[in-house]
Image (spheres, helix red, strand yellow):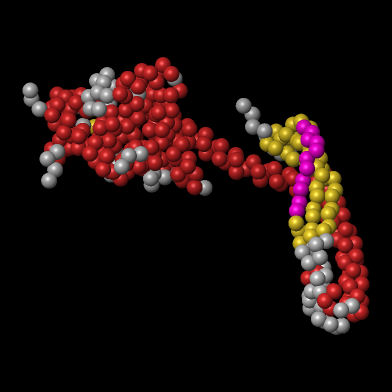
Amino acid sequence: MNDFSELENDLRALRPARPSPVLFERIEEAMAENYKASAAADAGPKIKWFWRFTETPYRFGIGLAAAAAAVILLIARINTDQTRNENTEIAQVSPSSQTRPVLPSFSGRNGVNGSMSSNKFVPSGATQVVYNTRDEGLQFADGSKQPLRRLRYQTQQTWQWRNPSTGASLRVSYPSEEVVLIPVSGQ
Amino acid sequence: MDNIASHEDWKSCFSEIGPGLLLFARQWTRSAADAEDIVQEAFVKFWRRNHKINNRALLYATVRSIALDFIRRDKRRARREATVVADADPTIEPQFKWEDEAQSALAAAVSCLPHDQREVLVLKIWNELTFSEIAGALGISQNTAASRYRYALANLKKSLQPQ
């Protein structure tokens, strides 16, 4: 079947030269560097996020933002409750065909089947604009020998909600400050 | 985690395939040192992505790709290697360890094969790739790989026949 089998056997008997031991060492070194690099890449973001959430100015910023959002949502809820009450009164005196586009699920004087959905705001957008970045130099964390670069970002955050039933939208915008510590590797 | 295990595994893997890999890289270089550079870069790059040799065609394709990049890096080298790779230049020789005159003649005959045939022969004989894997590594069809292999053997047989 194969008239080259003898030649193939002769070729297989011919052994290629082995790589030099230096090549082994070089690959080992490259693998070790690669392993260190991937380990550093794994550790890097963890440190960064740890510091992000424990840094006092940032925590203060989050608290301030949460408080502002809570107040605005509370005001918005009061407003929409008032609107609903007004609409209910209109529905009582107006023909149902006139109120249906605004509050489609009202079924009568006591019927409030769809009224809750009209007050529901769903998130529709969020933006964070960094308008200033300041490099505050290198520092050492507690017990760490690795220097960390301290960067301060000043941002303007904007959150938007939209009521799909009424088309009303709600927008909250507030300044915030974020401090990030980035590990610096020496050359 | 996985990296630590594979960091040790590569040694046994490389001891097995290293000689064949180096011989394959020699198809584009004159010196063993250049071939070792190519093999190192290709093997580390491949291992970093895959962590094991489960796709040999891809490994050899990586070696080939890096070898071609290696040639392109230096214009002067590229010109020189282009003439070498063109066809049947006896100055480029796969590195073999021969034990007698017959093996020496066989090694010389292999080095005189056209480049495309020698490439397939090296992958088939000394790297034990299937025609399907060779086709994947070289970007050719299986039929082309098989026919190049047969042409290589036929040419070898012809050149080794006593005049």
Residue at the image position 60 percent from the left and 39 percent from the top: A40
Main secondary structure of the magenta stretch = strand
Would residue A9 appear left or right of A144 to someone viewing this image? left
| Residue A11: % across, % down | 19, 34
The residue closer to the viewer here, A44 or A81, is A81
Residue B34 is inside the magenta segment: no
User: Does the rendering let one see residue B126?
Assistant: no
Residue B140 falls in which quadrant of the image?
top left
The residue closer to the viewer here, A11 or B148, is B148
Residue at the image position 74 percent from the left and 40 percent from the top: A180
What is the quadrant of the C terminus of chain B in the image? top left
What are the residue bounds of the magenta stretch?
A125-135
User: Does the rendering let one see residue A109?
Assistant: yes
Residue at the image position 13 percent from the left and 29 percent from the top: B158
| Residue A107: % across, % down | 81, 81
| Residue B76: % across, % down | 41, 16
Q: Is residue B56 above or below residue A15?
A: below
Residue at the left extreme of this rendering: B163
Residue at the image position 85 percent from the left and 74 percent from the top: A98
